[in-house]
Amino acid sequence: METYNIHETKTQLSAILAKVNQGESFIIAKAGKPIARLVPYEQALPKKRPVGFLKGKIKLPENFDSFHQDEIIGMFEGKL
């Protein structure tokens, strides 16, 4: 793993980030002492939830589509 001091990092940031984007990792040092590691970002994939995993655990009221309809419309129209 290659090491760059802070000054080199600041002057060559674009080139270093291009290498990181290709999968390389680097150490950033101050006066020769490592202070940070620059590694490629790995985006975590969201867990997939199985369809119907809450079936039978949630009950919606029969009037769900019109529940508090007048109040909600009033809020949108600025009446409440």
Image: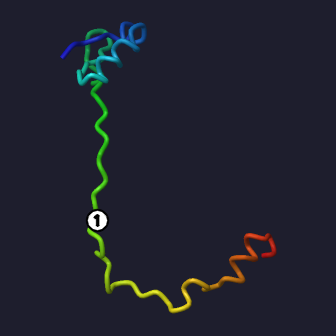
Q: Quadrant of residue 38?
A: top left
Report crowding for label 1: few under 14, some 14 to 19, many 20 or more residues within 10 A (C-alpha).
Answer: few
Quadrant occupied by the N terminus: top left
Amino acid at the residue labelled 1: Arg
Q: Is residue 36 visible?
A: no
Q: Which one is in front, 36 or 10?
A: 10
Q: Which one is in front, 42 or 61?
A: 61
x, y percent for residue 20: 29, 22
Tally of marks: 1
Quadrant occupied by the C terminus: bottom right
Q: Residue furthest bottom?
A: 62
**Which residue corresponds to the image point at 72% horizontal and 76% vertical from the top-left?**
73
**Which residue corresponds to the image point at 29% horizontal and 15% vertical from the top-left?**
29
Q: Quadrant of residue 4?
A: top left
Q: Residue furthest left?
A: 1
Relative to residue 66, is residue 2 depicted above or below?
A: above
x, y percent for residue 69: 67, 82
Which residue lies under the disc numbered 1? 49
Q: Quadrant of residue 17?
A: top left
Q: Is residue 62 left or right of residue 55?
A: right
Element class at badge 1: loop
**Which residue corresponds to the image point at 32% horizontal and 86% vertical from the top-left?**
56
**Which residue corresponds to the image point at 31% horizontal and 24% vertical from the top-left?**
21
x, y percent for residue 62: 51, 92
Relative to residue 34, is residue 49 depicted above or below?
A: below
Q: Is residue 20 visible?
A: yes
x, y percent for residue 12: 38, 9
